[in-house]
Image (tube, grey):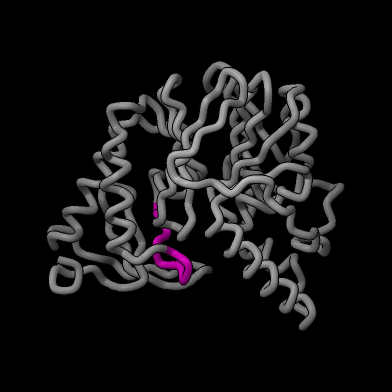
Amino acid sequence: MNSSWYDVDEILPGIWRVNDGDLDTSYVLCGSVRTGVIDTGLGVGDLAAIVAGLNSAPPLVINTHTHPDHASGNYQFADVSMTAEEWTLARAWDATARKLRAEGQAGADALEMMRPQRPLPATFDPATYGTHPLTEPVRLWSDGETIDLGGFSLEAIVAPAHTLGGLCLLDRQRRVMFTGDTVLQGTIWLHLDHAAAPDVALATYERLAGYADAVDWLLPAHGTRMLPGSFLTDLYDGLCRVWDGAIGPVFMSTFAGDGWYYDLGGYGPLFAQRIDDAEHA
């Protein structure tokens, strides 16, 4: 099942982790009614074939958000879903990308900017990156909605932070939460133009901390493969220290813009502006 681009392993019964070029992570849930595909990665490998080899039920993609490293493989699937906010953002980004290509900027440039950690598959042409039409979603998620994949029941938690329409997914029976880029043990990018305002993000993390007792494992899209549910409270507590002025910022540059990073202990948020008590009390 592994390939030069993908590493695939079963991390919990019926839940498969798909390492996408050492850059991001998708998850495949082997339901009896539908195969849940949480994010589709960069889209440079044949993810659809990987999914078909893991489970025979028809796949449903659920995007935690629609950044290129999470939704570029959507074109390989007939049924995709996301929040309404993410669909709006996806269409705007697609229009911008097409405009840039018309002006002579190749899709390969955008792919290189994301710095995949492995050589691209020999069957992939970088010039085609980002040229596939968007897949119209069959479902737009609202907060609190659920879906039964057949043995997997997922609850949608709309979590504006990294993006305005970010989505976390909770399996209460298995005590697992899929967090996308909203919760991870690394630099949490909250400095992007389409990220939630700092106060909105803080409220999201406060809410997520309330799920800590219902979760044994967090499954993020980058960094540490699995995190304990208690990390939700650790993250929120750290953010509260930022708001209280107990943790100072360090300037950080990224390919997607500059910001101010707050180190909570080897991980933490990156905001576009400094957080201070006067503005965010």
- Which residue is at a point 56% across and 56% down the rendered structure image? 84
Indicate yes or no whether the magenta region holds residue 189: yes
Residue at the image position 26 percent from the left and 50 percent from the top: 264
Q: Left or right of 180: which side holds 246? A: left
Q: Is residue 191 above or below residue 44?
A: below
- Image point (42%, 59%), residue name: 189
Does residue 244 lie above or below 259 as drawn? above
Position of residue 250 relative to residue 205, above or below, is below
Left-right relation of 92 to 279: right
Asked which quadrant contains residue 258, the reply is bottom left
x and y, in percent, of residue 230 in the image: 28, 32
Q: Position of residue 257 (x, y in %)?
A: 47, 72
Q: Look at the image and tell me whether residue 223 can be seen.
A: no
Q: Which residue lies most toward the bottom here?
A: 103
Q: Position of residue 145 (x, y in %)?
A: 49, 38
Residue 270 in magenta stretch: no
Is 86 or 15 nearer to us in this picture? 86
Residue in the picture at 59% in, 34% down: 27
Q: Which residues are magenta?
A: 187-195
Q: How many marks?
A: 0
The quarter of the image holding the C terminus is: bottom left
- Indicate left or right for 209 with 78 as reference: left
Residue in front for this viewpoint, 188 or 165:
165
Q: Nearer the viewer, residue 157 or 275?
A: 157
Residue 72 % position (x, y): 69, 53
Q: Quadrant of the N terminus?
A: top right
Seen from the viewer's position, the closer of residues 63 and 222 is 63
Residue 76 visible: yes
